Amino acid sequence: MDKITASIKKELYKIEIHSSSGNVLIADEPETVGGKNQGFSPNELLASSLAACTSATLRMYADRKGWDLQEVKMEVHLEVNREGKRTEIYRKIELIGNLDQAQRDRMLAIANSCPVHKILSGSISIQTELKEN
């Protein structure tokens, strides 16, 4: 199981995020809501996770098949409807390289089966507990 730790102190709304593998990143809120825009917002991190996973999955698949995929460019956009309790995720993928239509169609199917896509499109349960001091 992947483990992430995060902490926020007095500086509004700067969050240090640490992975179990030793990576560190900063998340923050935009200036429009009181942050300093020093890092990705939480929604941007979510969209980034899908973009990163999809890109890596497509790269791995094309490499395994020996296909001429030079680059994957991606845009991911989240639209959150809080009243309707629904989030729409829009993903636009550009495949650069010498790929025929059958290969492009297969890459779309592979994109839709990347691990983060499966997580986000499946049923999600979040278990939360307060830690004792």
Image (cartoon, rainbow, N blue to C red):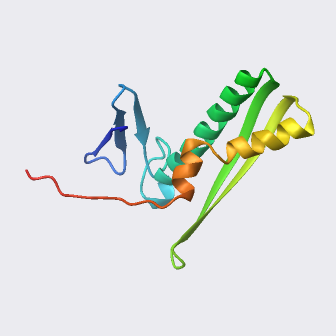
Q: Position of residue 43 (x, y in %)?
A: 51, 54
Specify the quadrant of the image occupied by residue 56: top right
Residue drawn at the location 27% of the way across and 58% of the way down:
128
Quadrant containing the N terminus is top left
* Residue toward you, 101 or 8: 101
Q: Position of residue 44 (x, y in %)?
A: 54, 49
- Seen in the picture, residue 88 relative to 6 is either above or below; the reply is below
The answer to whether residue 47 of the structure is visible from this angle is no
Q: Is residue 124 left or right of residue 115?
A: left
> Between residues 6 and 127, which one lies in front from this camera angle?
127
Q: Residue at the bottom extreme?
A: 83
The residue under the point 36% across, 50% down is 13
Q: Which residue is drawn at 40% across and 27% down?
A: 23
Q: Quadrant of residue 61?
A: top right
From the viewer's side, name the closer residue of 29 and 44. Answer: 44
Q: Which residue is drawn at 46% across and 41% down?
A: 38
Q: How many marks?
A: 0
State whether residue 105 appears in this view: yes
Residue 89 is situated, as x and y percent measured from the top left of the image, at 63, 58
Side (left or right) of 79 relative to 85? right
Q: Is residue 39 above or below residue 84?
A: above
Find the residue positioned furthest to the left. Answer: 133
Whole-percent x and y of residue 97? 86, 27
Q: Nearer the viewer, residue 114 or 75?
A: 114
Q: Is 32 positioned to the left or the right of 94 in the image?
A: left
